[in-house]
Structures are given as C-alpha cells and as structure tokens.
Amino acid sequence: MPSAPPDRVRAWDPGIAGIREVLHASWAHHSYPAHTHDAWTLLIVDDGFIGYDVARHRDRADAGVGVTLLPPHVTHDGHPLTSKGFRKRVVYLEESVLPEHFIGRCVDAPFVPDPLLRQSVSSLDRALSAHDLPAAESQLALVTDALQWHLIGRPGAARVDATRSAQIAGRARELLDADPIGAPSVTALADRLGVGPAYLIRCFTREFAIPPHRYVTGRRLDLARRRLLDGEPAASVAVATGFYDQAHLHRHFRRLLRTTPGSYQASMAQSVDPPSWKMTGVSTFIPSEGQP
C-alpha cells in the first residue's frame, strides 16, 4: 500500500495591500484545532475534502468546487474527510478588505458555489506565487468585488452606462500612456478617476479587451525591447522599464515572444548584415547605371 505524501506547508507575505498572508498546505492526516484569525480566510481546495465547524455550524470544502470564506474572529477548525488528506490554497485578507457586517453572513454560509469566482481566486494565487504584483492587485479587486456581490445576495446588476465606461477607460489609458514605467497601481488609478478598482478594470477591459495591468506590461515590454536592441544589459533594462527584476522581465518576455531577453538581444547581431544569396540558376535582373 503506497504511503501518503509528506505534509507540506509554504507561507509568505506577498507584500501587497489587503493581503495578510498566502498559505499552501498539503496534509495527509492533520486535523487542526478550533482557532480564530484576525483576517478573512479565503480558500480553495485542490485535492480531497475538508470538514470544518465554524461557530458550531458544520460545513465542508470540496476539491474543485467553489470557494470558502471564513470570517475573522470566528472560531473554526478543520479535518480531512478521507484517508487521502487534502491540499488547499489560502489567501488571508485584511479585515478592512470586506465590511464587518458581512461576518454574520459568512458564518451562516461560508461556501460560495461560484466556479468563475474559484477561477479568479486561483488566478490571484498564481499571480501571488509568481510575485506578479500588478496582476495580483487586479485579481484581488475583482475577487473582493465578486465576494461582496455574493454576500449581499447578488441583486440585479446595475445597467452599464456605455458612454461613461468608454470615457473612464480612455482617460485611464491616457494616464497610463503618460508614464508606463511609473504607472500608478490600479487602486491609485481608480481613486484618481473617482471609481472603484473593479469597476475600472471592467470598463478598461470592455473598451480595450485587456485589463489595465496587462496593458501596462505590454507598454513596458515595448520599451524593454528598444533598450535591449540598444545593447543595454537585461538586468538594468528590467529595472529601468518598470519590472520587478530580471526574472520578472524574463517571464513576461517569454510569454509574449517565446524567447528570452538575452536571445532576443543576441539575434540583433545576426540581422546586421544582409544574407548572402546563393545563385542556383536563377536569373537576376541588375539594372544598368541610370536605369530605374
């Protein structure tokens, strides 16, 4: 009989406003005792099943299904429901991210059966794992916005004013184009335009088919390509064009061009001289002097 995989825990502070901690855990037999957090516990289960009590209400979280949101200052525990244990990803949100009056709603119904929200939480976790802070900030805005809609019972969505949406998106792009390297965060940009971050992201994506953080990344890649072709080292190019470090530039460069900054820069030497053509019986017209 194969032995259960070893227990693993990885946790870190991602350094992004609104997120206290990120935790990945794989536990075969561990049952954690009743405890509380001073943060919102947002989790998705990737493998197995977790049973838990929250304020004496029994519930469960299953792999691949929805998300679970446990409120701050409310007692809960957890245990595997099968002998295979479970694997989960958790994002601990600061108390200020969601209104306090949602705590009671979470106690009554901590499970949110929304597959799209689960995808958004998974995308948020991947961005945090990759230390892609602009992407993580955008995903966090969308996730918290969706959570609030669920917690207030998802009333009918307000009709979108297409004209205003286009104006907001256009103004946002102007501000981003003015300084792609020092572009403000999506939260700062939304504050400047007098709207919420999630609303700004939806307006921008609706108008330009791309969220603001990806738009800025594309502009920064354009600037990085020019500097690489000017012969600057990739490490200095990364910092000079607004990327976190060389690895951050490398990852986005490969995603866009399927090559590395170094290979892209080296390719310049291969294209300086025109290729020499071999004549293999093909006639070539050479105009006489003065002939067009």
Image: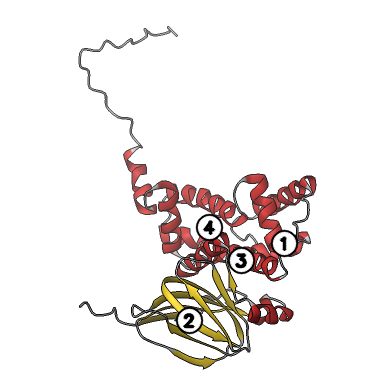
Residue at screen point 72% across, 77% down: 99
Which image quarter holds the N terminus? bottom left
Which image quarter holds the C terminus? top left
> Looking at numbered disc 2 in the image, what kind of residue is underneath it?
Gly
Q: Is residue 192 above or below residue 173?
A: below
Q: Cα distance, mark 1 to mark 4?
A: 23 Å
Residue at screen point 20% across, 16% down: 280
Q: Cα distance, mark 4 to mark 2?
A: 47 Å
- Residue that numbered label 4 is attached to: 241
Nearest to N terminus: mark 4 or mark 3? 3
Local secondary structure at mark 1: helix
Q: Is residue 202 above or below residue 290?
A: below
Q: Can you tell which mark lies on residue 143?
A: 3
Q: Quadrant of residue 158?
A: bottom right
- Residue that numbered label 2 is attached to: 51
Q: Cα distance, mark 3 to mark 2?
A: 24 Å
Return the residue nearer the eye: 169 or 34: 34
Q: Cα distance, mark 1 to mark 2?
A: 39 Å
Q: Nearer the viewer, mark 1 or mark 4?
A: 1
> Looking at numbered disc 3 in the image, what kind of residue is underneath it?
Val
Nearest to N terminus: mark 1 or mark 4? 1
